[in-house]
Image: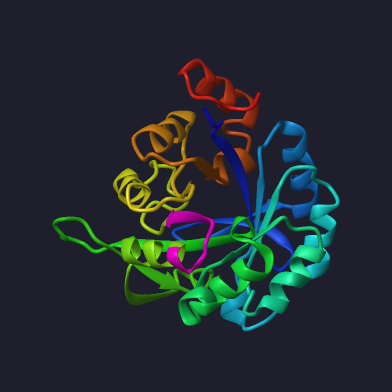
Amino acid sequence: MLTKRIIPCLDVKNGRVVKGVKFRDHRDAGDPVELAAFYNAEGADELTFYDITASSDGRAIMREVVEQTASQVFIPLTVAGGLRTVEDMHAILKSGADKVSINTPAILNPKLITEGALRFGSQCIVLGMDAKRIPGSNPARWIVHTYSGADGGTATDIDAVEWAMKAVKLGAGEITVNSIDTDGTRAGYDLELLRTISENVSVPVIASGGAGSPEDILKALVEGQADAALAATIFHYGVHPIGKTKKYLADKGIPVRM
């Protein structure tokens, strides 16, 4: 059985790791390079680095910060933010990333997924998705947002589940599903969203947005059928260290790398 992955997330703004609630009211969480080294030693399975305002600012990702971060980790590193072309992806992979995650640029130019997959392999291309539930929808529906690093971003008319399925056909090898409704709330992941997407795609799904406890991560992996869980707040502020979280999951019968 494949082990489930625990992935700390570094949301980087102006060179510092920050954490907000529903993409707003960011507060400082530390230096990305120092945190990367800490999580590498703590036993994280992977690390995700988001330059959260690169797309909304219309600028390139901070390569020097990525390079410094990559130098501190010996686990897979995924980098996202402002990657608009295959050349952008190549530059970040050369800077030390193992995967690239594309969100807004993929929505604006879906061919970018295919171009990246053909050049670097699907295993390198992660679809990032920020989804928000449509209030009162029955059955439940979610739409994706663009430029989410800019105070919640902009709503589209794209159905989240349909977009996930399309992205896989285009070549995405993995999907990070982030719920805007639960992001930073520590109230738990949107399990229905995770489960619906997991049941409709053939690639690994990473749960994101809402972890408040190891139990929330357990629910994402079991009820949400996710292959990995990404979290920030509970790890950054020492609420639930990675080692203790993994032990809790192992005690519950979840296969994890200790």
Q: Is residue 235 above or below residue 145?
A: above
Q: Is residue 55 above or below residue 168?
A: below
Total labels: the figure holds: 0
As rendered, which of 204 and 13 lies closer to the eye? Answer: 204
Q: Position of residue 82 (x, y in %)?
A: 63, 75
As rendered, which of 197 and 207 lies closer to the eye? Answer: 197
Image-based side of 212 in relation to 70, left or right: left
Q: Position of residue 129 (x, y in %)?
A: 46, 62
Quarter-of-image position of residue 3 = top right
Name which residue lies at 52% across and 41% down.
Answer: 228
Name which residue lies at 63% across and 31% down.
Answer: 242
Quarter-of-image position of residue 41 = top right
Name which residue lies at 49% across and 30% down.
Answer: 214
> What span is in magenta?
169-178
Q: Is residue 31 visible?
A: no
Residue 173 in magenta stretch: yes
Q: Position of residue 240 (x, y in %)?
A: 57, 31
